[in-house]
Image (cartoon, rainbow, N blue to C red):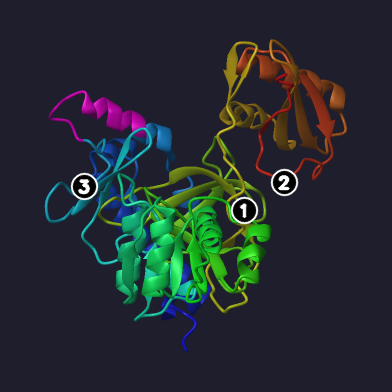
Amino acid sequence: MNKNFDVRETRDATVREMALMAALPGQVAHAQQSSAAFSGILKDINPAAVTTRAALAHLPVTRKHELLERQQTSRISLAGDVFGGFSAVGFGAAMPRVFASPGPIYEPEGAAKDYWRMARAIYAAGFRPGELIHNCFSYHFVPAGSMMESGAHALGCTVFPGGTGQTEQQVQSMAQLQPAGYIGTPSFLKIIMDKALEMGVALPSVKKAMFGGEAFPPSLRDWFSERGIAGYQCYATADLGLIAYETEAREGLVIDEGVIVEIVRPGTGDPVADGEVGEVVVTTLNPDYPLIRFGTGDLSAVLAGPCPTGRTNIRIKGWMGRADQTTKIRGMFVHPGQVDEIIKRFPEVVRARLVVTGEMANDTMTLKVETACSGPDSLLAKIGEAIRDVTKLRAQVELVLPGSLPNDGQVIEDARSYK
């Protein structure tokens, strides 16, 4: 049986990169022309020049809070665009459904088959055409249920729309319908299985699962494995659809074929070196919702080499925390972008980490700076001045050797006591 969803997964990495870069200028131009928001965001950009990742890195990053702010501003007028000008399609046949995420942020669902591109991840989790899937993602307000259902249908599977809650009924349905597997959060499947044990009901057909929406640690993976269920995780958002998915190799997540992923230093749009933890920024090739350099706010890092399964796309480690580390210090907000502004003034500085210690209202800021500079006194004083200039706060400066700071994506570490 074919282990890959399609031939694109195993194509030469150079061929894939050429195809993505060939499609990029057209998507940037489309976003400018069809999205009122990106018409403004990208107004000074020549799409024809955006043909490399280096050129893409010069475009501004749009983050979720900015999308929400534009939507909120637009909603003030009854004639305003509920999508804040980001959608390239309007109500009608081109947009069968609209969903809402916390904020609320409204997301369109286009009419394309497998609009969210979830079939690839479902296939990698072991599901095959002709099977029944018990889908326990929510069908209410948020797009998760529809994302998975549309992907399952594109794969040729039948779906039972279990949704969330009603645990006893979930057990009864699984026992009677005998689905091949489950899609939903790992915690809810554990609840269902615990309830089935309590009810004395066996669920022998459930042999595989695809999880999303929350962490799936190795301990929980092993718990399911001991009960005969092979669980795999996917990484998707309501804005972008599928971003990456786990394979049977269980070595990171493979990037989807329909997106361009960058890892950038938190608070900036600057790509970091492979292996360094940073914020996941995604450019989607979706024509209906053409998000260009959309900052997910999630932290991850690129893994070296291709997936052992033969899939050749870039791999990331998976979800490693949140990138928004804005912290209030002595009544002032300090954010990662300010730390980046400080270190950019000093070419001899490799990386920096702002550590806040002490107690609230009696805290201390220390900027730990990686540098090989041999003249520390002058550099310490200059960096201290830059900190005061940018943040309006005083801080200690500590010089450390390159490679000394943890590779965890943290630019601001809040180590204060909150007792």
Relative to 193, does residue 407 appear above or below in the rendering? above
- The residue tagged 3 is 34
- The residue tagged 1 is 301
Graded by Cα atoms within 10 Å as few (under 14), some (14 to 19) or many (20 or more), the crowding at tag 1 reads many
**Depth order, front residue of 383/307:** 307
- Of the numbered discs 1 and 3, the one sitting upstream in the chain is 3
What distance separates the C-alpha of mark 2 from that of mark 3? Answer: 39 Å
Residue 261 in view, yes or no: yes
Quarter of the image where the C terminus is located: top right
**Which amino acid type corresponds to the residue marked 1 in the rendered image?**
Ala
Question: Seen in the image, is 389 located left or right of residue 30?
Answer: right
Relative to 381, does residue 238 appear above or below in the rendering? below
Where residue 195 appears, as percent x and y from the top left, is 52, 58
Single out the mark in the foreground, 1 or 3.
1
Segment tinted magenta in the rendering: 68-81
Residue sitting at x 18%, y 52%: 95
CB within 8 Å, label 2 to label 1:
yes
What distance separates the C-alpha of mark 2 from that of mark 1? Answer: 9 Å
**Which amino acid type corresponds to the residue marked 3 in the rendered image?**
Ser
- Of the numbered discs 2 and 3, the one sitting upstream in the chain is 3
- The residue tagged 2 is 407
CB within 8 Å, label 1 to label 3:
no
**Depth order, front residue of 266/26:** 266
Q: Secondary structure at mark 2?
A: loop
What distance separates the C-alpha of mark 1 from that of mark 3? Answer: 32 Å
Relative to 334, does residue 282 appear above or below in the rendering? below
Residue sitting at x 65%, y 70%: 226
Where residue 276 appears, as percent x and y from the top left, is 67, 50
